[in-house]
């Protein structure tokens, strides 16, 4: 039996509802269609975009679907299945409730709805232009709904002029997708652009896995946050403060809807400022759950802003918790450092580190940052000095070294109770990789690892030609690949490299125009690999990784010349000179 659920709201209720959605860009269409699919209890959603959303936006789901009458009423204003009475707008649990989304979309684009709410494969297709049904057919389809919006703003060219560049508009679409997939992880999503799949996000992922899945390039160091206070639950993740210039990703959700709230944003930022200075960006993924009665969604057309009855309580809870988490995060390093000392049998080098542990966490960071900032005024420091390099090589090879990290950039250890050695983690690893590939290049069979699934890289014609010119050089280094049409497939890579970095490495390598047979090709390839596969700044290393990096670096036979030192040495009394 095909029961109808969509009803027209009574005038009295319409008057209590704030003005609804105005479709101002393709991303608004994507958001509204995705929210409808979620409200329909879908567990699979496919999104198809063409020409950055200008030509086609299509969302396909396997949700409840609609009956014949519901489908014909769905695009009419104030027709909704979400609320029925005046009281419903005070306890909203669905994504939509105004009954205006499809009406607004039908007014600015060519709308096609295909849907069925039964399992007999018989569905309805209706085509709407300018808010009027132009065509109506039956068709065979599985249970669910497919909504297509073509030629957005075709009938309102003046509004189309206000759109930004295609890149910016597409980024808005991606951002709307992020908001949905972070909150609703019980759904499988596939996202296509111009028939090419960009995202395939499977269901039932944890929040941490989902964050790492969609922001994998940024490699966030996530700190979990969990708060429970009476009828308020807050959970999610904050990031360790970032010293890079990369913009952070910041999301606040209330009952699984992403919102904008300047008070909560300032609360989070100020919590960081209370503990740490000089960070450039932070990221946070905060989920707030509270009783729907305490939330008023009826204040913003696209529901991006919300009135929270207990906003001050929520704000205080978040502020206190973040400060506590950051304080504990920095105390961990100090406590781990403490454990490495034995007061009964302490070497001279350990005594030097023991003096550091006497400082507070804030003092320690300030002193070491001052050392770095004032390196140019030291009376003596060493850069790429061969004699010093040999002495340090002997020392790190024959001793267990105690290391720690600062600013996620330098690995530090002490030497002879006189010096503090700062090693640039990125440049040091770059040096290690360069020497490895240079010295092992003729023994390619011993340095390759087979990947389970070939790594595919799509190439431009210029990139493909350049790659053909260096295939033999790549095989000598340890890469094995084959070319098919405009793509390269790597089925074996050097064991020193992780397969996640291969695409990025080759996108960088192929910006250089290689000529076949050029003797300089191999050296250029190794330089690119070493640079882009090396440990990046901002990467947090554990004690084993730091010690391995130090030992590998100081056993290198040659140091790459650089305008800035890979390592430098400070006298221990520099700490006394920077004490505040």
Image: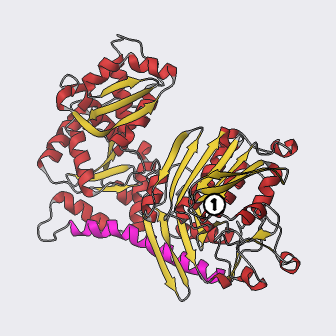
Of all residues, the one furthest to the top in this rendering is 517
In percent of width and height, residue 458 lies at 47, 30
The answer to whether residue 380 is seen in the rendering is no
Q: Is residue 324 magenta?
A: yes
Which stretch appears magenta? 311-340
Residue 247 shown left or right of residue 579 in the figure = right
Say which residue appears at 22% left-offset and 57% top-offset.
402
In percent of width and height, residue 397 lies at 14, 45
Residue 338 shown left or right of residue 54 in the figure = left
Q: Which residue is mark 1?
A: 116
Q: Which quadrant would the N terminus be assigned to in this image? A: bottom right
Closer-to-camera residue (525/137): 137
Vertical relation: 15 (above or below) 278:
below
Say which residue appears at 49% left-offset and 80% top-offset.
227
Vertical relation: 238 (above or below) 218:
below
Q: Residues within 10 Å of mark 1 (few under 14, many from 20)?
A: many
Vertical relation: 387 (above or below) 405:
above
In percent of width and height, residue 568 lies at 33, 43
């Amino acid at each position: 039996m095909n029961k109808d659920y969509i009803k027209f709201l009574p005038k009295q209720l319409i008057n209590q509802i704030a003005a609804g959605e105005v479709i101002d860009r393709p991303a608004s269409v994507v958001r509204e269609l995705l929210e409808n699919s979620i409200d329909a209890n879908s567990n699979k959603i496919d999104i198809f975009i063409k020409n950055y959303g200008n030509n086609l936006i299509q969302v396909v789901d396997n949700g409840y679907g609609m009956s014949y009458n519901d489908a014909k009423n769905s695009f009419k204003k104030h027709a909704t299945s979400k609320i029925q009475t005046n009281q419903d707008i005070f306890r909203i649990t669905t994504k939509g409730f105004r009954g205006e989304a499809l009406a607004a979309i039908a007014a600015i684009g060519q709308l096609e709805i295909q849907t069925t709410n039964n399992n007999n494969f018989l569905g309805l297709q209706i085509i709407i232009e300018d808010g009027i049904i132009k065509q109506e057919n039956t068709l065979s389809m599985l249970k669910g709904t497919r909504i297509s919006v073509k030629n957005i703003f075709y009938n309102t060219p003046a509004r189309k002029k206000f759109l930004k560049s295609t890149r910016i508009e597409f980024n808005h679409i991606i951002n709307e997708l992020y908001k949905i997939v972070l909150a609703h992880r019980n759904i499988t999503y596939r996202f296509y652009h111009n028939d090419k799949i960009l995202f395939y996000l499977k269901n039932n992922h944890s929040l941490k896995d989902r964050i790492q899945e969609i922001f994998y390039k940024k490699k966030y160091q996530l700190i979990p946050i969990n708060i429970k206070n009476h009828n308020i639950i807050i959970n999610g993740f904050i990031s360790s403060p970032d010293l890079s210039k990369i913009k952070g990703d910041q999301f606040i959700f209330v009952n699984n809807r992403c919102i904008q709230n300047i008070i909560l944003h300032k609360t989070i930022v100020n919590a960081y400022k209370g503990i740490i200075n000089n960070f450039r960006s932070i990221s946070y993924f905060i989920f707030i759950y509270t009783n729907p009665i305490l939330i008023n969604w009826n204040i913003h057309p696209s529901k991006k802003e919300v009135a929270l009855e207990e906003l001050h309580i929520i704000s205080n809870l978040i502020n206190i918790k973040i400060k506590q988490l950051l304080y504990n995060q920095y105390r961990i390093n100090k406590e781990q450092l403490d454990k490495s000392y034995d007061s009964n049998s302490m070497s001279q080098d350990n005594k030097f580190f023991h003096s550091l542990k006497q400082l507070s966490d804030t003092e320690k960071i300030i002193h070491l940052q001052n050392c770095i900032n004032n390196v140019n005024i030291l009376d003596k420091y060493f850069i790429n000095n061969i004699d010093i390099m040999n002495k340090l090589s002997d020392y790190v090879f024959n001793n267990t070294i105690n290391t720690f990290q600062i600013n996620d950039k330098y690995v530090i250890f002490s030497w002879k109770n006189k010096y503090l050695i700062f090693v640039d983690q990125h440049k040091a690893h770059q040096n290690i990789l360069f020497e490895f590939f240079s010295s092992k290049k003729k023994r390619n069979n011993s340095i390759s690892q087979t990947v389970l699934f070939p790594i595919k890289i799509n190439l431009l014609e210029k990139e493909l030609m350049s790659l053909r010119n260096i295939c033999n050089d790549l095989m000598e280094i340890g890469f094995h690949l084959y070319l098919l049409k405009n793509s390269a497939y790597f089925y074996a890579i050097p064991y020193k490299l992780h397969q996640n970095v291969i695409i990025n490495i080759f996108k960088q390598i192929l910006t250089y125009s290689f000529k076949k047979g050029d003797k300089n090709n191999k050296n250029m390839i190794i330089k690119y690999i070493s640079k882009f596969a090396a440990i990046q700044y901002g990467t947090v290393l554990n004690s084993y990784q730091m010690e391995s990096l130090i030992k590998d670096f100081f056993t290198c036979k040659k140091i790459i010349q650089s305008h800035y030192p890979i390592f430098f040495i400070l006298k221990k009394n520099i700490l006394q000179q920077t004490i505040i």
